[in-house]
Amino acid sequence: MMLQAWNPQCELRAKEILYRCMENLEATKAALYLEGNEGGFELATSYGFGRRDTLNAVIKTGDPLWDWVRRRRTEPTYLNDATDYPTLRTVLESSGTSHLLTIPLTVGERLVGLVDVRDKSRKAPFGPLDVGAARAIAQAMESFLGELGTFGAVAIKPEEAQAPPLVPVTSARPLTPGLTHRWIIEELTGILRALSQMPGIAATALTVADGKNVRALVLRTAPLDEQGRQALVSHQARASLEAGVRMPPPEAWGWEEQESGGREARSEEIRTSVLHQGPPVWVVLSVLTPAGSAAAEPVLVAAARHLAVARTAADYRRAARNLARALLEPGETPFAHLRQHCQGTSEVAQRIASTLRLPESEEELITVGAYLHDVGMRELDYARVYRIDRPGEPERQLFMRHPEIGARIVENAAFPGDLALAILHHHERWDGRGYPKRLAGRNIPLASRIIHIAEVYDVLTSPTSYRRPTGRDNALSVIRAEAGRQFDPDLVPVLAEAVRT
């Protein structure tokens, strides 16, 4: 049993990481569970749970929370609405919470525990930026567990933890060109906010350069003076030059300094890593520490790893969308109007998902699902049926088959998330009068609800639509009139915000 080796010093250190977890995530409750003898997880320590809260001493095999974490063992995952995962409703209600974020902990390939985080302050939902901060917490907790050696990891020896010489460090495996997704930088910034609070870190400086301009975000304990800022510019310029790129002069740099929340005020040494080599952009990270500190290297390694994972995800995302386009128009027959409608629906759906700050995986599912929502039309008499102004009953019945046909086309695609389900239910109505299953309210998958409202907006506004297009405001008025009947009433104002940005 793991906790047989758990002494007050271990618990104190775990509590420090757990408390930092709550601070970074602005959460009110957090608990650490570690692997026990029976395959479940035992409560090691917790913060914020009161006497009236139900907090299990053991999460047994088969428990809803055990199943949730096992299925999401590779990434921190959050849940803001229990109706989206009904088996966890009792777990949340028993502790008086409505928002959950779980952080799986692994040593090697072994799942050895989890951090159970509940409820952000001001009743805010968890979001994608919290996932970045949660990854940093996972790394800190996993490093601590690795040092204990309880799960087979070798403890770090003091002599092995000394910082290497203070010279510019470049990525051993540079990322491929084309860092075009702003969310990658946003996620990296999120994880740096957590890493900047680690002991021994005085400041981190994340710099993005495009060849003409440089933008630097400095997260620091104490404000940098002019000398410190010049030293940082010089160090990053030298590291970039060794990586093959010349930074613009200091007058082209734009600076933003923010409090990191850390405790280390001494910044005597700088270590720098070129995390991404462009074009179109270069990403450079510097870490400022006291003299002789070994704290910089873990931060640089963690940031590089996080950026590499995010960049790989972006590559897969691009490939998935290209495959979706090929699936929509196979062979040599172009379906121009179908493609344009699906593209427009996908763009609106993605903006809705982004406005809702859904997890990246769910946003991608919605984006691809919206692109393929009418893929079933290609198996019907598309050229005749799709653009009939006044279809008769035979044509209407034929048209109503396309969600089920589309779901069958993609059901074996092994796309992350339930792509087939999103497509199958995209013509369901909030009041239960849709098709094919006459689902109602929140029984309709969120992805399908978003695709449905995005599709109608595109039909109302697109110049390639089968009906005369109208303007944005008129289209929103039409959709508002159907809130609570055809559409999820909570999504109507989100659509209005999404199409105005």
Image (cartoon, grey):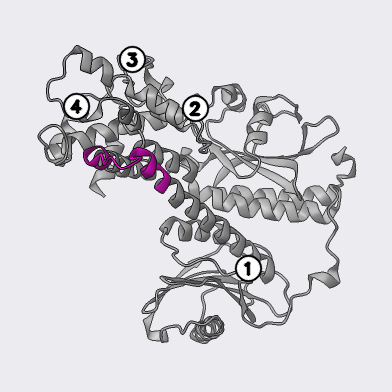
Q: Which residue is mark 4?
A: 384
Q: Position of residue 451 (x, y in %)?
A: 34, 33
Q: Is residue 349 magenta?
A: no
Please rate how many residues cluster around mark 4, counting C-alpha atoms within 10 Å: few if below 14, some from 14 to 19, many from 20. few
Q: Residues within 10 Å of mark 2 (few under 14, many from 20)?
A: some
Residue 4 or 378: which is nearer the viewer? Answer: 378
| Residue for badge 3 | 432
Q: The residue under label 4 is which amino acid type?
A: Arg
Residue 47, image x, y percentages: 67, 41
| Mark 1 Cα-neighbour bin, 10 Å: few <14, some 14–19, many ≥20 | many
The location of residue 30, given as percent across then percent down, is 65, 41
Mark 4 and mark 2: Cα distance apart in space? 38 Å
Residue 102 visible in rendering = yes
Mark nearer the N terminus (4 vs 2) = 2
Q: Amino acid at mark 3?
A: Gly
- Residue placed most toward the observer, 318 or 254: 318
Residue under circle 1?
Answer: 300
